Image (cartoon, helix red, strand yellow):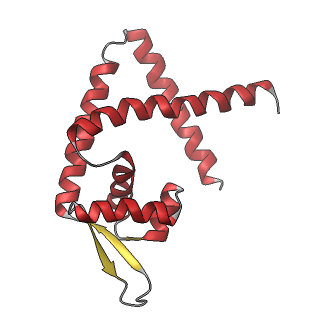
Amino acid sequence: MNQKIDLIAENLISIHPLLYKSISKPLRTKSSITPGGMFVMGSLKRYGILSMSDIGKCLSMPKPHITVIVDKLIEEGYVERLNDPKDRRIVNILITKKGLKDFEDIKQAVSENLKIKLSTLDKKEQDILATASQQVKEILISILSKE
């Protein structure tokens, strides 16, 4: 591999924990929902009813891990299980009205917290980050669409 690819990989790997820390700390002060729970609820909001396997595919997580997260979300009333009418072996998951409302409230609170942090940047830093983050997002979407 060339050095540029090594640098990109290292940078992308280091971004995740930094973002996770920025998002998970305020999330934990607002709710008992874990970041994993938020990812599951976000997938359900985006795609509607999903099987446990489909949630795992969306999040690149093993089914047993998804099951633990979903069980906790069910216990809190954020999602519900629905049996597939065509195949009783398949269990589908649906976000509840409470889950959708709390998901949006938490997402808004986390977003506001992040905006406060970003507002401390000067204009030049904001411009650089706006452009760079948009470009990284577009490139990652392109890479993932090839899988």
Q: At 60% across and 46% down in the image, what residue appears?
A: 142
Q: Nearer the viewer, residue 90 or 48?
A: 90
Quarter of the rendering containing residue 93: bottom left
Tally of numbered tags: 0
* Residue at 74 percent of width and 31 percent of height: 5
Please state the horizontal and vertical placement of residue 74, each as a whole percent of the image: 27, 65
User: What residue is rendered at 37% in x and 29% in y?
Assistant: 22
Q: Residue furthest right?
A: 1
Return the x and y of residue 48 as percentages of the image width and height.
34, 66
- Compare residues 6 and 146 and report the one nearer the observer: 6
Residue 65 horizontal/vertical position (percent): 47, 60
Picture layout, residue 54 above or below residue 8: below
Instruction: Name the side, left or right, on which 72 lies relative to 100.
Output: right
Where does the C terminus fall, quadrant-wise? bottom right
Q: Quadrant of the N terminus?
A: top right
Question: Eyeballing the image, is 1 above or below 41?
Answer: above
Residue 28, by quadrant, is top left
Looking at the image, which is closer to me, 78 or 12?
A: 78
Q: Residue at x 19, y 44 (%)?
A: 105
Residue 43 quadrant: bottom left
Reply above or below: 131 against 16.
Answer: above
Counting from the top left corner in percent of width and height, residue 131 is at 49, 24
Is the residue 125 above or below the residue 22 in the image?
A: above
